[in-house]
Image (cartoon, rainbow, N blue to C red):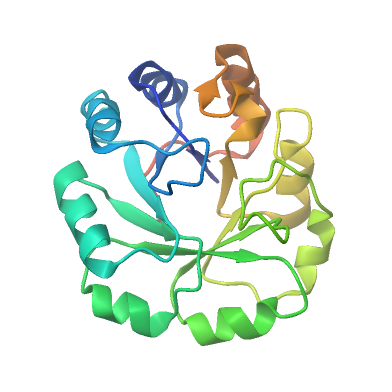
């Protein structure tokens, strides 16, 4: 089971995530997000990281040229799509790094997973105003009813005090956390990060390349 710590805005937070054992960090390139980073911030964060930590770029309905340019400039090792992107969009990107598709839990989820046809699916809680990253916990047991993708990432309101329950319930391939390790949006809290990793420790088998 792997850990992705998302919404990094400061090099020191990303480096702490790496030192604590996170397998991946997320960089949000969505202007509407309180965790959005510009090119300069992202570069500082990426440069602070050891090579064995994945750098995942988060996008929402972004122009393909922008996604490709950001991958090249930032050395991203994966992208995470939170918008209305479909398989045709990904094919048009023509990128070699893995793609994670974020989907909101709901009755349409099985059909969306079937249509997507890609390896990694992140299932999150969403609202009418937020595509993800709401920080709201949800009933993870309901996810047992879906067709399981090859690589399942669970997100949505995860914290040190509930992540073990989510893992026991779903046995996901990875968990994704942002607000649950923050003092405020984009600013990570070291103690919360340590506690989160400690809560995940019984379910981990050592660090390996992210998305494997």
Residue 43 lies left or right of residue 189; in this view the side is: left
Residue at 26%, 32% in the rendered image: 46
> Looking at the image, can residue 185 be seen?
yes
In this view of the protein, which residue sits in the foreground, 76 or 174? 76
In this view of the protein, which residue sits in the foreground, 65 or 198? 65
Residue 118 lies left or right of residue 133; in this view the side is: left
In the figure, residue 62 lies in which quadrant? bottom left
Q: Position of residue 188 (x, y in %)?
A: 53, 21
Q: Position of residue 136 (x, y in %)?
A: 76, 44
Residue at 50%, 73% in the rendered image: 84
> Looking at the image, can residue 209 be seen?
no
In this view of the protein, which residue sits in the foreground, 114 or 86? 86
Residue at 69%, 58% in the rendered image: 126
In this view of the protein, which residue sits in the foreground, 56 or 67? 67
Residue 101 lies left or right of residue 208; in this view the side is: right
Q: Position of residue 16 (x, y in %)?
A: 42, 18
Q: Is residue 87 positioned above or below 55 on the image?
A: below
In the figure, residue 203 lies in which quadrant? top right
Quadrant of image for the C terminus: bottom left
Residue at 71%, 80% in the rendered image: 108
In the figure, residue 198 lies in which quadrant? top right
Q: Position of residue 64 (x, y in %)?
A: 27, 68
Number of numbered discs overlaid on the protein picture:
0
């Amino acid at each position: 089971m792997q850990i992705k710590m998302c919404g990094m805005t400061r090099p020191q937070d990303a480096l702490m995530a790496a030192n604590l054992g996170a397998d991946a960090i997320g960089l949000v390139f969505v202007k509407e997000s309180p965790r959005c980073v510009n090119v300069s911030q992202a570069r500082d964060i990426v440069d602070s990281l050891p090579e064995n930590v994945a750098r995942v770029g988060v996008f929402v309905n972004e122009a393909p040229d922008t996604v490709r340019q950001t991958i090249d400039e930032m050395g991203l090792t994966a992208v995470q799509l939170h918008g209305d992107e479909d398989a045709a969009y990904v094919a048009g990107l023509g990128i070699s790094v893995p793609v994670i598709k974020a989907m909101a839990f709901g009755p349409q989820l099985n059909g969306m997973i079937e249509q997507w046809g890609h390896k990694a699916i992140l299932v999150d809680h969403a609202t009418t105003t937020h595509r993800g990253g709401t920080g709201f916990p949800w009933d993870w047991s309901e996810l047992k009813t879906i067709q399981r993708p090859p690589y399942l990432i669970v997100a949505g309101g995860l914290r040190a005090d509930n992540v073990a329950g989510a893992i026991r319930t779903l046995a996901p391939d990875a968990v994704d956390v942002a607000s649950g390790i923050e003092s405020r949006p984009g600013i990570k809290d070291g103690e919360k990060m340590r506690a989160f990793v400690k809560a995940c420790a019984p379910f981990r088998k050592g660090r390996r390349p992210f998305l494997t």
